[in-house]
Image (cartoon, rainbow, N blue to C red):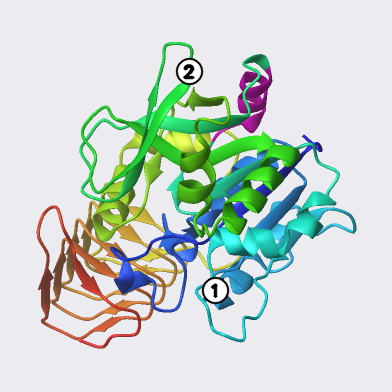
Amino acid sequence: MNYILGLINLYEDNSLIKEFTHKRPIATIPFAGRYRLIDFALSSMVNSGITSVGITFPEKAASVLDHLRSGKDWDLARRHDGLFYILPDKDENNAHQSDLKTFYQNLEVLQHNPQEYFIISSGHTVFNMDFNNVLRFHQNTNADITILYHKTGREFQSPCTLIKTKENGLVTDIAKRSKTRKDSEISMGVYLMSRKIFSAIVEQSYERGGSDFLVDGIMRTISQYNIYGYYYDGYVSNINSIADYYQTSMDLLDPKIWNELFINKLPIYTKTKDDVPTRYKHHAQVHNSLIANGCVIEGLVEHSILFRDVKVKKGVEIKNSIIMQNCQISENSHIENTICDKNVIVSSQKCLKGAENYPFIVEKGTVI
């Protein structure tokens, strides 16, 4: 796959997940105990043999740099190719920066890459797949653009991109919607096209005043190109809201989904961090939960996800919740249907409880 360049686009709508994105893009939100959301797209590219991957930088880039660094953990710290960053030019007028504008500003550099094809992915979609199959489909159908899509088994109350396809896979319509019905054909936010078509779309769309690669670059040129949909039948979740994040995290407690994402297929890589094993003390009770290393547990944890270095004191009950790194839950507190971001301290005898389908959010560094 040395003839494919990977691009991960971090310009994403965070309006429904702002509690987690004050200082980070959606792509670096912690997930599954030790990962970040960007790990899924990046690992799928690496596992498919893609050795050159570019990351577009959003405004809040510090967490991206801290997580990815040189790309060593994904075997992308290379003398040639490897991981590189696509930076926006400084705009003296402080004009709005967009993905299409950033691609246009860096088009000359991207055009000089030797790869014949570009695969562009969002950083907020959870999946684990081999892109070699997508390339074969793209070539066999003589597609100009291939859009990867999946079908959801439940309704989503968050923005998404829907497509309509004919029996042969030809895309006849692309539309953005604020919510999704069951069994809709939902774009995964992953597109495959040749370098030549990518350059033409970016150049033409930006010079016509466009700002969004999907809306102005693909949706408005649907009549100009043969666009095919590639159906992926594995587990996929697009995370655009708090509800999406919570439901997708709870999905991981289903062994079938966990095995599909992390065990049965190629590995998902992330930033390496060594730590001591979790300690389960005398009164600890843990049921159907995902516990990262470095935790100390003295209370009850049920149907929940605990990240690294979480401290759960005596008499604590944690149910249907997500507790991120370095949180401390003090004695006799009750946490249910709640997400605690990193470094939260809950003092003794507190009760935090959210709705069954929409969790209570505790922002990073909060002391309760």
Q: Is residue 88 left or right of residue 156?
A: right
Q: Position of residue 45 (x, y in %)?
A: 65, 42
Residue plotted at (60% across, 53% down): 8
Q: Position of residue 206 (x, y in %)?
A: 59, 57
Considering the image in quadrants, where does the N terminus appear? top right
Q: Position of residue 207 (x, y in %)?
A: 61, 57
Which SS type dominates the magenta stretch?
Answer: helix
Residue at label 1?
63
Residue plotted at (28% across, 85% down): 366
- Please, what secondary structure does the residue beneath circle 2 have? loop
Name the foreground residue: 126 vs 293.
126
Q: Is residue 270 visible?
A: no
Disc 2 marks which amino acid?
Gly
Q: Position of residue 86 (x, y in %)?
A: 69, 64
Residue plotted at (65% across, 71% down): 88
Magenta-drawn stretch contains 18: no
Disc 1 marks which amino acid?
Ser
Please, is residue 107 above or below residue 248 in the view?
A: below
- Please, what secondary structure does the residue beneath circle 1 have? helix
Labelled pair 1, 2 in contact (Cβ < 8 Å): no
Q: Is residue 299 left or right of residue 216?
A: left
Residue at label 2?
169
Considering the image in quadrants, where does the C terminus appear? bottom left
> Residues under labels 1 and 2: Cα distance?
38 Å
Residue plotted at (46% across, 41% down): 219
- Residue that extends furthest to the front in the rendered view of this protein: 208
Neighbours of disc 1 within 10 Å: few (<14), some (14-19), many (20+): some
Q: Is residue 57 visible?
A: yes
Q: Tell me the magenta residue range.
A: 129-139
Q: Quadrant of residue 30?
A: bottom left
